[in-house]
Amino acid sequence: MRIRALTLRIIRQFFRDKRTLALLIAAPLLVLSLMYLVFNGDSYTPKIGVIGIPDSLAKQAEGLDADVRAFGSPELAEKALEAQDIDAYVLWDGSAPAIRLEGSDPARNRAVLSVASAWLGQTGMSAGIGVPAGKGAPADTNAHLNDVADTSSNAHSEADKGTSAQAGPAAAPAIEYLHGGPAMTTFDSLGPVFIGVFAFFFVFLIAGVSFLKERTSGTLERLLATPLRRWEIVAGYIFGFGLFTGIQAVLIALYSVHVLGLMMDGSIWYVLLVMLLLSATALSLGTFLSAFAHTEFQMIQFIPLVIVPQIFFSGLFDLESMSPWLRWLSHLMPLTYGADALRGVMLRGEGWSGIAGDVLVLAGLSLLFMGANVLALRKHRKI
Amino acid sequence: MSAPIDTAIRVRGLSRAFGHQTVLRDITLDIQSSEIFGLLGPSGSGKTTLVKMIAGIDEGTSGEVVMLGTKLPNLSMMERIGYMAQSDALYEELTAKENLDFFAALFGLKGAIKKTRTAYVMELVGLGEHMNGIVASYSGGMKRRLSLAIALLHDPRILILDEPTVGIDPLLRKSIWSELEKLSRQGTTILITTHVMDEAEKCHRLGLIREGRLIAVGSPEALKQETGSFTIEEAFLHYGGAAR
């Protein structure tokens, strides 16, 4: 009864505050759309200068996914490199190619090197052993979907004996994917983490600030002068906000999958479950942490402390190379579990057994933060 | 003073410290049933701290508060207390009616009782016509009156009002006071804090509070007589000086 009154009041307040409602619902969708546009742009075509390369190579270069320009002298190419007109140039000193990169953008460096290795790596090698370059060198890997099982078991033992020059062009590897596929984009891979991040971030902020406002406006004290119990206050907030954050979570998930076409290998229901739990965690954490803020501004200060590290540790970046004790930090962060489960379902098609651990941890964390909030309210009233 | 027959609020040796700062020292006080008891003192003297402990929100560092025979804080006693805080604790995005509905639900009022009580308290504070106005658009005085209406809503046995008449025009103040007097005649115990002297005169008894100490308790007449002063203000100065 009392919880219902509190829930109803929060819902009414929400409908009066159109801007907050818009922030909660529209902002994550807008940001996700922008991300989609950023990540799904065409892949970068590197601009490569060439100086005095053999004709055979120059001819091959036409087929490359690169913008190749010929320069008359290394000095001219160097100038263009300095002006960032080109990303790299290739110099041929008669026997071997040398590549000089502009070097300030790792993504462009990679683009140049991947083009260069496909182009110069193979022809360079074949030129070395005297085979006329031009035919059969850029292997059409996709066409060779042979029975891999047979050839690979045979080739395995022989490949060790330095016969790579022979095996290389003859048996191009057949490529298969356990999950995902060649069409998978960066957006597909990072998308699950980002939808988790946005659901978490906006809910954390709005719930935290609203609960704080209850305190700064004096209404919390007023509530504590009624027979309302502390846990009823927390529960009322969870239900009242839960309605909106739940709608938000569902909208984000459906929008990313059905409108933005984010890769979706598993069941949407598991995604919704994880999203709901993730926003429940953000909701309980936000309301709990607001007990330690005195103003809205101090609540905002929790963003770099609580949200940003979670974004870094939740799977956007590969933590394998990080020192183990630092990696351990990721286990303290709710977003890690949410992002892990979302990736599992969306990219690897995991079912309940794959995400059960993450789901339980998220549910446990939500309960933990709610309990902590009930205790934190003791500061204002002991009973 | 003779032993009270019917004590509504009994305060014994109550102290409250925040860290190293002691805000209230050893307050002992009895408030009789259906009496209007005024707490008079400058701002920062500890009135609000004392009132919060009597309302059962805060707890003393030492000492106790007993209300209608029950030691505070106690959740079931909360239903019998009507509390009006010093700041207007209202939900500004909502209408006056929605605010009242919310608090009515917290106190378990519903149906016809809720309807009549809501209409009655809003009429009492002169906001009957502004029932559906958004609180954010209210003036300061209107918000104060709505706070008072909410405190009265569930017809509490004990009414605790922290500076209730700030920003309310004299005419309405007069009608609110006559209503308080009526409630007190009907048996409601009223504890009110003020720093307005003419309001203090209307209380049945006064407690003068200064720097966290209760320096004198008595009816306005008795306090003036005892100190040979013409006004409460003079009496306050007298006790304040004597306390040093």
Image: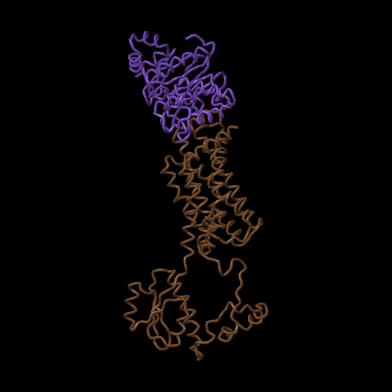
- Of B168 and B122, which appears nearest the observer? B122
Q: Position of residue B55 (x, y in %)?
A: 50, 25
User: Among the chains, which one is purple?
Assistant: B
Q: Residue furthest right?
A: A150
Depicted A245 relative to depicted B159: above or below: below
Q: Position of residue A324 (x, y in %)?
A: 53, 60
Depicted A6 relative to depicted B160: above or below: below
Depicted B192 relative to depicted A362: above or below: above
Q: Position of residue B169 (x, y in %)?
A: 37, 21
- Of A52 and A307, which appears nearest the observer? A52
Colour assignment, chain A: brown
Residue at x 50% of width, y 40% of height? A15
Is any part of residue B42 visible from this angle?
Answer: yes
Q: Position of residue A339 (x, y in %)?
A: 55, 56
> How many dots with numbers?
0
Q: Quadrant of residue A237?
A: top right
Q: Is residue A149 left or right of residue A111?
A: right
Residue at x 62% of width, y 50% of height? A360
**Quadrant the N terminus of chain A occupies:** top right
Q: Residue furthest bottom?
A: A130
Q: Residue furthest front?
A: B129
**Quadrant the C terminus of chain A occupies:** top right
- Of A322 and A210, which appears nearest the observer? A210
Depicted A167 relative to depicted A81: above or below: below
